[in-house]
Amino acid sequence: APIVWIIENVTQPSLAPEYMRSRLVRIESDAIVNCNGSVATSKEWSLMQVSELDGNPIKEIITKEVINSWNFSMLSIPERFLEYGTYLVSYRLQLLASKIFPLFRISSTYIKIVPTPLLASLIEGGLSKVSRGYQDSILLEPYTFSEDPDFPEEKVFNYTWFCRRVDMDDDFIVVDSGDPLDIRIQSDNIQDIPKPFTVTQELGGGCFGKGPGAMNYNKGKLNLQIASLTHYDALYEIVVMIQKDKRYALTKVQIKVLKEAPPEMSIQCADPKLCIPTFGGVYVNPSSRIALASICSDYCDPGMTYRWQINSADGQNVKESRTCGGNSSLAEPTPSPTPPPEDKGASLGPDPCPPLIPTGKESMDIAIGSDFFKENDKHESFKITLFVRLPSGVEGEYVMTLKLNKPPFGGSCKIEPSEGLAMIDDFIVSCQDWQDPEEAGIDQYSYFVYEPTDSGPQKRTIIAATQPKAELLMPVGNFTLYCDIWDKYGTFVEVEVGELTAFMPNQTLVEAYNVGDVLEYLSATGNQFKIGMLLTAQ
């Protein structure tokens, strides 16, 4: 019978590792098959919901023909497939060598599916500051723009609204429960929203002249008349707390109130998947280029001018240009005074020193290169401000706060041995001590090399694994091996693992290795990754 095991398996339900329902779950197995000849195998994963206390079964979850990887050596459970709870995950490998005596082994582990934090947002794009004229209104829609990642189609939230005047009142106190699912504020000063112009010039502080507090309003949409506030030329902040089951989340926006109406603008991420709403801003992936688009919805004018400003969240200046090999890389593209020289076979590779802000800062939209975040790595969040001015001189201010989903840190990677035979010898790569600053966890280790192409070096992935240790088979050559360590929110750090050399084996060694038999064995054990590496090495 085969020897089968699940990598990093857990034998007690109370110790099951936790996975958020909105995330993909990967579980890997391995096996040893001792057989004199080639033999076919069958593989199957099964799921059983169990009691967290004693592991007693509750109900079976059908996987066959339902989960695409039900008969692979690695099970990938799709996001939102399982309900909250604890599950026994079992892998069965059977040798199809005997019709009389079934030769199989089963290995099992436990996992726990837990709630994902709610995503709260008031305005599309997650703006943290907007501008409005005193006679205008602002539509705030937490119902529309907030989400439960576990059940995106469900919009069943409770809403609590708060308001304060920023230049007069202290911040609301966030109750720190230590639970990322339970973030809330409280206030006993509950106020009705007054009719427009009825509290103008009131001096009692807050939004309505009665100090900071909660609004007597609990719906998921609010069309707030700006003249219900006490003053123009003032800055207000509205906070909404959304609640579902035992989860709470906060979102807020500041409203700069002007006497005259400015252009009404919004700022949106070109790729919404790269911007995750959070309290006071949006999480972004510093490993990727961030493109922001501005959209005018009212009081627009063809003569409007745009000006972007980037600071750290606490107002410090940031580095917007750099020098690479003697050439300055500026925020704004600089025109060439003379036509470019005729191409005489120059490299078509990418710019080795691209500008940190390729679009410049005086256009409707802005792009921020990933190298910008590397050059400003001492900052963890940034305030992206768009000033839009009408020909009349009225200027609106709109702010998106980018909070960096910081990449994994603190670990190292190595390869042993550094020399060996191509196709035949295993190169063992391992990474250890990597941590995720947001504590969501490490999701994947992707080992790769750079290969030269006409358009510049390109990554060639050798293996992407959920475990920090892997066995590589390499083709002939000298290589510098790298690894991208990914967290569960999609940010990664690239590290150099080391140099390795794979020598050409002689004919005798190749024949003794017997590639055909090795492929049959790898197929029997279900090691698809190694099959791919072996075929590439050939």
Image (cartoon, rainbow, N blue to C red):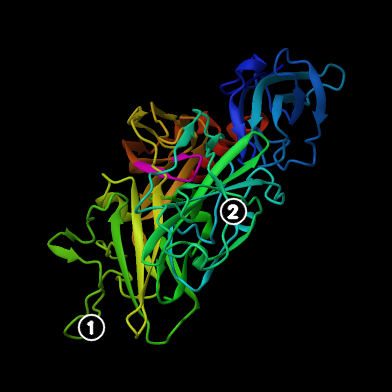
**In this view of the protein, which residue sits in the foreground, 218 or 387?**
218
**In this view of the protein, which residue sits in the foreground, 378 or 249?**
249
Q: Would you identify the image quadrant in which residue 234 lies? A: bottom left
Does the rendering let one see residue 454?
no
**In this view of the protein, which residue sits in the foreground, 303 or 470?**
303
Residue sitting at 39 percent across and 75 percent down? 364
Where does residue 446 sit, x and y in percent of width and height?
Answer: 46, 41
Where does residue 379 sit, x and y in percent of width and height?
Answer: 29, 46
Marks 1 and 2 sit apart, C-alpha to C-alpha, by 71 Å
* Residue range (magenta): 486-494
**N-terminal of the two: label 1 or label 2?**
2
State the mark number for residue 363: none
Q: Pick the quarter of the image with the N terminus.
A: top right
**In this view of the protein, which residue sits in the foreground, 22 or 210?**
210
Q: Give the mark toward the camera: 1 or 2.
A: 2
Q: Farthest residue in the right direction?
A: 100
Residue sitting at 52 percent across and 64 percent down? 228
Residue sitting at 56 percent across and 21 percent down? 8
* Residue 503 drawn in magenta: no
Residue 16 vertical position relative to residue 507 in the rendered view, above or below: above
